[in-house]
């Protein structure tokens, strides 16, 4: 299972990379705006900076919503670095753009997936990744993890190469349940990954070991 971090914050990306378990980064226009990255030149420079830090795929999202615009933007993004994965929204022109890039051997991530039908269309168009947003589905009392299960079944039935990138992950149980279901990748905040390492009995046990060692050694 691959771990991607879902942020455009360079310090957090570096921290996750230094942990040694990071496989990639996902960004989106909201995350770029949150970091105050505006204007095409700055956006492209920021993606380059991310690629310099991380060992793995870096999803960079197009802003256009028409086929020609998505192709134009995606080609500029893909030329930045071989780590760049062009992130394309699940809309009709987006499906055409996925097919275009798939034919050219450019990696893609189809974003804003909220149904199994959308995931199937993206896989048919040759997407490298599909991103079902499980947290946002949970937010509206819908079963986000159930969607991952359903997509897993469909992709396995037909041996699609498209990887399931569980997105909008909010907490450690999302990661564990995605791992149980067989999502290929999760993307989420650093806090969710860090929470996987924590257990109160580990802290209590370590404190006792150190205290016993100190008592015995003076
Ligand atoms: C995925 O690629 C998106 O960037 C992201 O996971 C959305 O997460 P959110 O619902 O927490 O904004």
Image: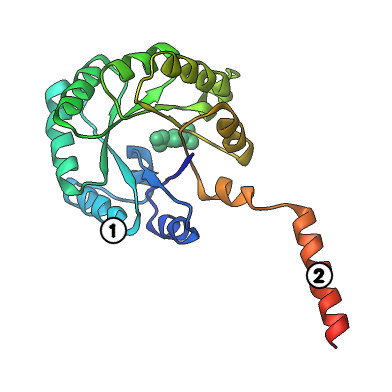
Does the image show residue 125? yes
Judge whether 167 appears above or below 92 on screen: below
Q: Secondary structure at mark 2?
A: helix
Q: Position of residue 27 (x, y in %)?
A: 36, 42
Of badges 2 and 1, nearer the viewer stands: 2
Mark 2 crowdedness (10 Å alpha carbons): few <14, some 14-19, many ≥20: few
Q: Residue furthest top?
A: 117
Q: Secondary structure at mark 1?
A: helix
At x 54%, y 20%, the residue is: 149
Between 177 and 131, which is closer to the camera in this rendering?
Answer: 177
Q: Position of residue 12 (x, y in %)?
A: 45, 56
Judge whether 213 appears above or below 132 on screen: below
* The residue at label 1 has a CB less than 8 Å from ligand 1: no
Classify the position of ligand 1 by quadrant: top left, top right, bottom left or bottom right. top left
At x 77%, y 54%, the residue is: 200
Which residue corresponds to mark 2? 209
Q: Quadrant of residue 88?
A: top left
Q: CA distance from mark 2 to mark 1?
A: 40 Å
At x 48%, y 33%, the residue is: 168
Q: Position of residue 68 (x, y in %)?
A: 11, 24
Which residue corresponds to mark 1? 52
């Amino acid at each position: 299972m691959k771990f991607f971090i879902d942020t455009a914050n360079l310090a957090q990306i570096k921290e996750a990379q230094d942990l040694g378990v990071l496989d990639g980064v996902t960004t989106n226009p909201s995350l770029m705006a949150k970091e105050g990255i505006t204007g095409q030149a700055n956006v492209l420079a920021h993606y380059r900076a991310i690629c310099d830090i991380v060992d793995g795929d870096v999803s960079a999202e197009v802003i256009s919503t028409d086929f020609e615009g998505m192709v134009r933007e995606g080609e500029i993004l893909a030329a930045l670095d071989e780590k760049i994965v062009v992130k394309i929204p699940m809309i009709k022109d987006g499906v055409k753009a996925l097919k275009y890039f798939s034919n050219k051997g450019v990696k893609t991530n189809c974003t804003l997936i909220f149904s199994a039908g959308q995931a199937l269309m993206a896989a048919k168009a040759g997407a490298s990744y599909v991103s079902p947003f499980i947290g946002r589905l949970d937010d509206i009392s819908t079963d986000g993890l159930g969607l991952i299960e359903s997509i897993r079944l469909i992709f396995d039935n037909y041996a699609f190469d498209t990887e399931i990138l569980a997105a909008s992950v909010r907490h450690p149980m999302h990661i564990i349940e995605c791992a149980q279901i067989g999502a290929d990748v999760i993307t989420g905040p650093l806090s969710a990954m860090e929470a996987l390492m924590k257990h109160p009995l580990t802290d209590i046990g370590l404190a006792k070991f150190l205290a016993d060692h100190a008592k015995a050694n003076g």
